[in-house]
Image (cartoon, coloured by chain):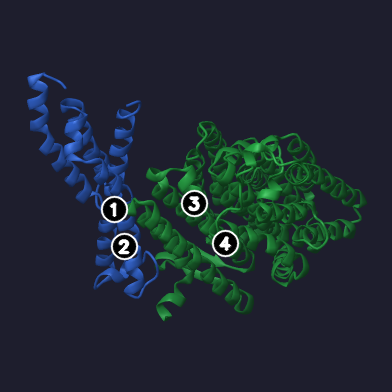
Chain colours: A green, B blue
Amino acid sequence: MELVSSHLPALQIVIPLLGGLLAALLRRGVPAFALTLAVSWIMPVISAVLLDRVLTGGPISYALGGWPPPWGIEYRVDVLNGFVLMLISTIGAVIVPFARRSVALEVGERREAWFYCMYLMCLTGLLGVTITGDAFNAFVFLEVSSLSTYVLIALGRDRRALVAAFRYLIMGTIGATFYVIGVGFLYLLTGSLNMVDMAARLAAAPPEMARAMVAALAFLTVGISLKLALFPLHSWLPGAYAYAPSWATVFLSATATKVAIYLLVRFLFSIFGIALDFRGLPIVEILLALSIAAMFIASIIAVYQNNLKRMLAYSSLAQIGYMMLGIGIGNLAGLTGGLVHLVNHAMMKAALFLALGSLFYRIGTVRLAEIAGIGRKMPLTMGAFVVAGLGIIGTPGTAGFISKWYLAVGALDRGWWILVFLLVVSSLISVLYIGRVIEMAWFRPVAIQVAEAKDPPLSMLLPLLILAAATVYFGIDTRLTAGIAAQVAEFLLGGLR
Amino acid sequence: MSSDLILRVGTKLILPFILLFAIYVQLHGDYGPGGGFQAGVIVAAVVILIAITFGHNAAKRVAPRGLVECMVPMGVLIFAGTGVAGFFLGGNYLDYSVLSHDPIHGHHLGIFLVEIGVAVTVSGTMVALFYAFVERGR
């Protein structure tokens, strides 16, 4: 037991890594899936223990290879990444039972084991970016997750998946390159790659270094913004989400962009925060302007989409706008709102994409025109879609409302009335695109092509219903989500003063 | 495929020396230029040379597809497994000092094992890529 408990930070990464390799060696779909299920269910247990230790006992540091921190690679868990680790591993564990049938149908017998290998590699990369305390190691894990994501997308049935994966490959590589250039600047300035060490050295940096610091900040922000698909660097995302296998879309939409947002928060608040009061730069104004543009433009484009996966992809872009808005507002309530929206959006959007995955499993299409009356044939699936959809809109009583409430409070604290108004208006646009689906699914006569459809098997239905229930539950009891998010925000802003 | 006698005999003559050179590069890697990546590429070049001279099927008898596809994850598994060994011998993940009686020897052994893992994955990946190109459109 001692062996396990002292190595938990490493095990968080090593278990999915070994799992992915073994899944590839098993070469058959069913055993590879069984292994994936086991690994995915172990992950949240480790994250929960780590988060609990951090909340009670402060940051945990793990020296990889026995090399002590500023020199070696350090895995460092504090409240911020403990929270994000918990989010990713829980989402993975909840949605994984859905994969069995969905992946067997969409990816095909021969490639199933490779699919699960790539999923576990992606999980390794995402958890790695989150847990590591080393800026360059974060780049390596970012590439591990990105490379496996390109494969996951390219495994989609539609041939356009290849083009979508290639576009993401180009954009993702540019983003990663910018990130490395930024880290390179910081390494020149500080002589260190360890995040904590970097922050301390930047705080003591002489003023003539300020210009290089601004350049580093600019490269890092643009690079990470490409990865998190901040408007207008989002062009890769709609195609990637639309043509990837349904289950891959669920996983990516709920986790990949969240990890990139974590990385940006880490750099802005923990590393630059002390040294460079970025309120002196127009970076806050830029982030606010881009977030608002994302909230409106992406939502309006979503209204005009006929492919529902593409519609939800644009909706994700708008929701990323809300998360970035929280970072831009930058006070306690605003940051809490942005961070809690990481969790809330992850579960709501995972539920919506799972519902679409179920639709595709039953009727083989996710085009709006072809799902008339599906609500009466697949009541539980579409019921869950409605609940999660209400969450995306931000209806009181759902998790989405909580995030928007905190964002509004944060904006009011700063006296930005106009921002509260914009929040409400952009929510009204989301009523339009969610409403179109609800209208088509529930208020139209049943079309011939969906007459035979029924709710999917339990292994697919259960993750969907759990996430829909969570959307309501976390709209009422916010201790686990907003409670921890507020602690994280306090921790981040404490670093700033 | 090729009926050129000189090419076929020449290839057969040179193959063992290429493999020997690969082993030299592999084992020499920790103190001189070379290492697992370079050795892996050289091993893969052997298979590719066989495919070019004697045809695709001859190469597949030497390195069957199934074996090649297993080599890709297997090498990483050797690397990761070396790291995991650190757990059980009382160190941290990837700590090579505990692999042997004294830290220097332990590091030597650790790098040696890791480089073998690198060679296995690199050669497997190279050959798998080559097969993928050759079989395109069939």
Picture disc at residue B82: 2
Q: Which mark is residue B117?
A: 1
The location of residue A21, given as percent across then percent down, is: 37, 55
Task: Kindly tell me whether residue A404 is visible in this rendering.
Answer: yes
Amino acid type at mark 4: Val
Q: Chain of mark 1?
A: B
Instruction: Name which residue type carries label 2.
Output: Thr
Determine contact: label 2, label 1, CB under 8 Å. Answer: yes
Residue position marked by numbered label 3 in the rendering: A101
Q: Vertically, is A301 above or below A266?
A: above
Q: How many marks?
A: 4
For this orientation, the residue located farthest to the bottom is: A2
SS for dot 1: helix
Select label 4 or label 1 by which is in front: 4
Q: Tell me the CA gap for discs 4 and 3.
A: 15 Å
SS assignment at label 4: helix
- Label 4 marks a residue whose chain is A
Q: In this view of the protein, which residue sits in the foreground, B50 or B45?
A: B50
The residue sitting at 38% across, 55% down in the picture is A23
Q: Earlier in the sequence, mark 2 or mark 1?
A: 2
From this view, report whether residue A216 is shown above or below residue A470: above
